[in-house]
Amino acid sequence: MSKQAGRWLAWAGLGLGLFVVSTALVWDDAVPAVELDLFEWINGWPDALAVPLWPFMQFGMVVAPFIAAGFAFYLRRRRDPALGLALGGLTMWLLAKVVKEVVGRPRPGGLLEDVNYRVDGGPDGLGFVSGHAVVGFLIVVVAAPYISRKWTVALLFLALLAGTLRVYVGAHLPLDIVGGAGLGIVAGSLINLVTVRD
């Protein structure tokens, strides 16, 4: 096994660990005290932030991997990362919906009484895992081998911000984001294991 393959397997293991631990913590609709405190702090940020920060939340939308794939192909003229982003992103967005049905954890409004809702937030539906987090972190991992460290950090910041804003608008609890991030890291690492050459 090459050093690079070992690295991607290690990242996949880390992502799987995040997903498994967060799933165990939220099973049976549990809301750990630390998660509740973090949710109340983020969800309590001023309403005035909602509109200016809304565009950053779109980093994890289902269309984001296709946009990223277009940029990847335009900048690098390489099919593998572009296909990995587009197909991997769509597949994981759909898989996130399956995980939601299996785990069955409601959104914050189904578990808590005091939730501040902003644009794109609401009490209906299921929360674990966050599709935005899955997609955002997949983009970071798949793009990382092809961009500089500075741009990787910038994308990571966007993924973290998008996930945090999903908590801010009342759409998710923090462990929904952690589980989604883990799933995105697993998928992105496995895509890179297959497509990235030494």
Image (tube, helix red, strand yellow):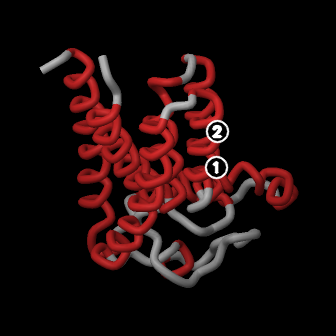
Position of 118 with respect to 163 (left or right) is right
Name the residue beneath numbered marker 1: 67
Residue 40 in view in this figure: no
Label 1 crowding class (10 Å Cα cut-off): few <14, some 14-19, many 20+? some
Identify the amino acid type marked 1. Answer: Ile
| Mark 2 crowd level (few <14, some 14–19, many ≥20, 10 Å Cα) | few
Q: Residue 188 appears at what percent x and percent y?
A: 38, 42
Residue at image point 50% right, 24% down: 146
Asked if disc 1 and disc 2 are in contact, CB closer than 8 Å, the reply is yes
Tag 2 secondary structure: helix
Label count reads 2
The residue at which mark 2 appears reads as: 71
Q: Which residue is rendered at x = 45% and y = 63% of the image?
A: 93
Residue found at x 27% / y 36%: 194
In the displayed structure, does residue 99 sit left or right of residue 120? left
Q: Hey, which residue is sitting farthest left in the picture?
A: 1
Is residue 80 placed above or below 94 in the rendered structure? above
Placement of 9 over or under 131, stated as above or below: above
Find residue 97 and report its image quarter.
bottom left
Q: Nearer the viewer, residue 162 or 61?
A: 61
Question: Is 108 left, or right, of 31 in this rendering?
Answer: right
Q: CA distance from mark 1 to mark 2?
A: 6 Å
| Residue at position x 32%, y 54% in the image | 22
Residue 144 drawn at (x, y percent) = 48, 27
Give the residue type at disc 2.
Phe
- Residue 71 drawn at (x, y percent): 64, 38
From the top left corner, tell me how far across and down residue 121 is, in percent.
Answer: 66, 72
Quarter that holds the C terminus? top left
Q: Tell me the SS state at disc 1.
A: helix
Quadrant where the N terminus sits is: top left
Q: In the picture, residue 76 is in which quadrant?
A: top right
